[in-house]
């Protein structure tokens, strides 16, 4: 049966009972031309541990857009980053719905079978997965909805199309039920803006009588705390509308709940009282061991002591039971200290940031590096610069062309960072998620039109509290240490929330213990002017608007403190220019590109080999990009190419032969180059318009260049607004070097 639900600017058609009927739950969702199949399967046997053994796999089929997979194996293999991150979003949104004590291995599989380029796959995938789970025999009695909020033309937009999202300055993804929010992810999107400024603001030396000039400036588009709360309110309303419609539609179709057993927490009031009476101080001392490995070791010693007591032997207390009770007791102590005494396990105030130390460019041969240490969390951020060929190439189902990613953030979390002797493995979902969060926070402050490819690697050397936020802080300073132009510094801070009855506490810069024993954690990154990225997981359910506002403003206070230290450190950065790769971008007459290439590419190959550089040419724009490891060689290659373009080509504009003539015919005899007097005014005709100016045919049949800066007394963005082909103009000879003539427009 098909069920149509129109909510939040899109029509969703659910086909129930048609496919995958042996799964515990299944739903086929259609939105426009997108078709997604979500299934839920459950084992009949529980695992021994007391946790939710949930696995989520989101898989994109290439046939969904009429493609055959590339590579040697012509089938879908390892999931891409987008698939992994989407799986993580679905997991974080649905895991809190499972009943306490549920321990049956459960798998949610989401297949994208057909893909409309305008449909948001992350929103559709979560909604389909939630429908399949709600319809299954697993006792989950709440529907979840995902919505995306954009900010376009000064208005919040619910579920914008993929093309509309590209014009948005906000990307906010929120998942929740009818009553409560479960997960939030947000990023700001930088944009280029045209601004009318007084001419004196651009250059004080220019004529102040000139009124205004239009300049283009990059905007980071940070969002302040009140704007974020307003956007989340918009998302909550949309989620409530959607989940109400889902529950109304799907409740009559829901399978009867399976008869399942649930694991109970191992509790014992007698052991709890025994620990409180005889081992309270020992537990306090263990809590003060801030490192996870040290704390676990101390708690393990206490368990061993208790088990050797005569009471434990007579009562027959098991190690598993005592271990469970002592962890519950530890959690109670931590939360009581915070709620009642307003003091934390390490003695800090609730809004106090741990000590921070910053060292930049500590690696002599890395392009940029920063060792950022905050308490017992330490990240070594390292930047490497490259050219276009170093960009990460990947495909998205919603994009026709391959995407070249020129900013990569790789986050690594080795076991030794938490004192574990675990083998090094390829990055998992957590590593990819943390790296993606750091990338989203930092990308808005990078130049949109950057020429370089940038790879930022964060090696976590110690971890006790948000290492992803240390990655952001160290990462932006490593970028500056590599000589990259950064619009503003970005800092990140991890916040926590604890609720006990009608009391609550907001914690700044949480450590691992507070993350584990708290009710909610969220990470906020941004500049002094606003938030660029936000991630929030709400473990206990709903959160009031006032508490959320309090937490965001406390995060702002902490972020400002961290930024102050980072700004001081950035003033001490010494960029190692001698090892930085050099990149030059300049323009030439587009007709000269053929001369740079040479016959069968001979000339350009010789330049590449001689100067040890890479060269990219844009035939239409006449742009030349040269990249290399040696500054002197790059500059020499640039000078060599300029000399080539200054030489006259045989056959005039024919590029080496007479128009329509035989390729083996002899070149025409060159005309003598006429000589002009500096400041002489002559009549000319516009023969070619390019983005950097216009070529004017002068008396004697030679062309001169009228640069865009010489067309008017103010900045000119579009040459064609002032000149037209074959237009007659009067120009002044500014300079002549052989056949190279620089002109100014005579007005």
Image (cartoon, rainbow, N blue to C red):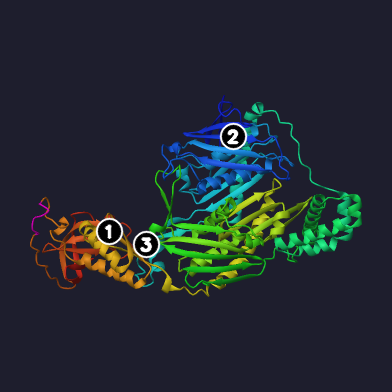
Q: Does residue 199 show up? A: yes
Magenta-drawn segment: 661-667
* Callout 2 crowding tier (Cα within 10 Å): few <14, some 14–19, many ≥20: many
Mark number, residue 622: 1
Residue 560, by quadrant, is: bottom right
Of circles 1 and 3, which is in front?
A: 1
* Callout 1 crowding tier (Cα within 10 Å): few <14, some 14–19, many ≥20: some
Q: Which residue is mark 2?
A: 39
In the image, residue 79 lies at what x, y percent? 51, 45
Residue 108, by quadrant, is: top right
Q: CA distance from mark 1 to mark 2?
A: 53 Å
The reply to whether dot 1 and dot 3 touch (C-beta < 8 Å) is: no
Q: Which residue is mark 3?
A: 213
Q: CA distance from mark 3 to mark 2?
A: 58 Å
Residue 304, by quadrant, is: bottom right
**Could you tell me which secondary element the residue under label 1 belongs to?**
loop
Q: CA distance from mark 1 to mark 3?
A: 26 Å
Left or right of 327 in this view: 462: left
In the image, residue 89 lies at what x, y percent? 59, 46
Of circles 3 and 2, which is in front?
A: 2
């Amino acid at each position: 049966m098909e069920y149509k639900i129109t909510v939040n600017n899109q029509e969703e058609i659910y086909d129930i009972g048609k496919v995958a009927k042996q799964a515990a739950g299944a739903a086929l969702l259609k939105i426009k031309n997108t078709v997604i199949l979500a299934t839920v399967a459950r084992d009949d046997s529980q695992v021994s541990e007391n946790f939710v053994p949930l696995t989520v796999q989101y898989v994109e089929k290439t046939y969904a857009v009429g493609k055959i997979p590339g590579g040697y194996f012509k089938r879908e293999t390892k999931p891409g980053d987008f698939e992994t991150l989407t799986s993580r979003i679905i997991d974080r949104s649905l895991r809190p719905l499972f009943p306490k004590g549920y321990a049956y291995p459960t798998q949610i599989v989401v297949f994208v079978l057909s893909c409309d380029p305008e449909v948001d796959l992350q929103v559709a995938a979560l909604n389909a997965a939630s429908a399949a789970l709600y319809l299954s025999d697993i006792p989950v009695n709440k529907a979840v909805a995902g919505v995306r909020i954009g900010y376009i033309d000064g208005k919040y937009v619910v579920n914008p199309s993929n093309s509309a999202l590209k014009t948005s300055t906000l990307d906010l993804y929120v998942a929740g039920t009818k009553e409560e929010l479960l997960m939030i992810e947000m990023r700001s999107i930088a944009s280029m803006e045209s601004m009318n400024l007084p001419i004196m603001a651009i250059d004080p030396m220019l004529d102040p009588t000139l009124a205004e000039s239009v300049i283009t400036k990059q905007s980071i588009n940070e969002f302040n705390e009140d704007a974020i709360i307003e956007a989340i309110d918009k998302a909550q309303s949309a989620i409530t509308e959607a989940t109400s419609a889902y529950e109304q539609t799907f409740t009559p179709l829901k399978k009867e709940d399976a008869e399942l057993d649930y694991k109970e927490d191992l509790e014992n009031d007698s052991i709890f009282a025994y620990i409180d009476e005889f081992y309270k101080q020992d537990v306090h001392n263990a809590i003060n061991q801030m490192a996870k490995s040290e704390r676990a070791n101390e708690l393990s010693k206490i368990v061993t002591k208790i088990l050797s007591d005569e009471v434990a032997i007579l009562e027959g207390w098991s190690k598993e039971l005592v271990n469970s009770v002592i962890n519950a007791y530890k959690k109670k102590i931590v939360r009581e200290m915070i709620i009642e005494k307003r003091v934390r396990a390490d003695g800090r105030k609730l809004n106090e940031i741990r000590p921070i130390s910053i060292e930049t460019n500590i690696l002599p041969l890395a392009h940029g590096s920063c060792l950022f240490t905050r308490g017992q969390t330490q990240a070594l951020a390292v930047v490497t610069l490259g050219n276009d060929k170093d960009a990460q190439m990947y495909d998205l189902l919603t994009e026709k062309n391959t995407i070249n990613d020129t900013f990569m953030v790789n986050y690594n979390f080795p076991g030794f960072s938490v004192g574990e002797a675990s083998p090094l493995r390829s990055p998992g979902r957590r590593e990819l998620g943390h790296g993606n969060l750091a990338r989203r926070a930092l990308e808005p402050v990078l130049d949109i039109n950057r020429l370089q490819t940038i790879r930022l690697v964060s090696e976590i050397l110690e971890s006790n509290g948000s290492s992803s936020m240390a990655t952001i802080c160290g990462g932006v300073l490593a970028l500056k240490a590599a000589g990259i132009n950064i619009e503003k510094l970005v800092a990140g801070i991890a916040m926590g929330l604890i609720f006990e009855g009608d009391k609550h506490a907001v914690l700044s810069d949480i450590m691992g213990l507070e993350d584990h024993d708290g009710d909610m954690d969220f990470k906020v990154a941004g500049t002094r002017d606003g938030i660029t990225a936000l991630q929030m997981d709400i473990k206990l359910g709903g959160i009031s608007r006032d508490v959320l506002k309090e937490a965001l403003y406390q995060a702002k206070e902490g972020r400002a403190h961290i930024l102050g230290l980072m700004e001081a450190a950035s003033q001490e950065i010494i960029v190692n220019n001698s090892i930085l790769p050099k990149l030059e971008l300049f323009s030439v007459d587009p007709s000269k590109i053929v001369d740079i290439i040479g016959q069968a590419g001979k000339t350009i190959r010789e330049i590449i080999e001689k100067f040890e550089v890479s060269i990219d040419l844009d035939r239409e724009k006449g742009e030349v990009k040269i990249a290399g490891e040696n500054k002197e060689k790059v500059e020499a290659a640039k000078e060599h190419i300029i000399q080539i373009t200054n030489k006259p080509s045989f056959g005039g504009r024919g590029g080496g032969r007479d128009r329509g003539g035989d390729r083996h015919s002899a070149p025409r005899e060159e005309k003598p180059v006429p000589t002009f007097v500096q400041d002489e005014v002559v009549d000319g005709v516009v023969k070619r318009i390019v983005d950097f100016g216009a070529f004017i045919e002068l008396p004697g049949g030679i062309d001169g260049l009228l640069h865009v800066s010489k067309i008017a007394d103010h900045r000119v963005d579009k040459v064609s607004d002032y000149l037209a082909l074959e237009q007659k103009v009067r120009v002044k000879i500014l300079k002549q070097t052989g056949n190279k003539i620089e002109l100014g427009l005579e007005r």
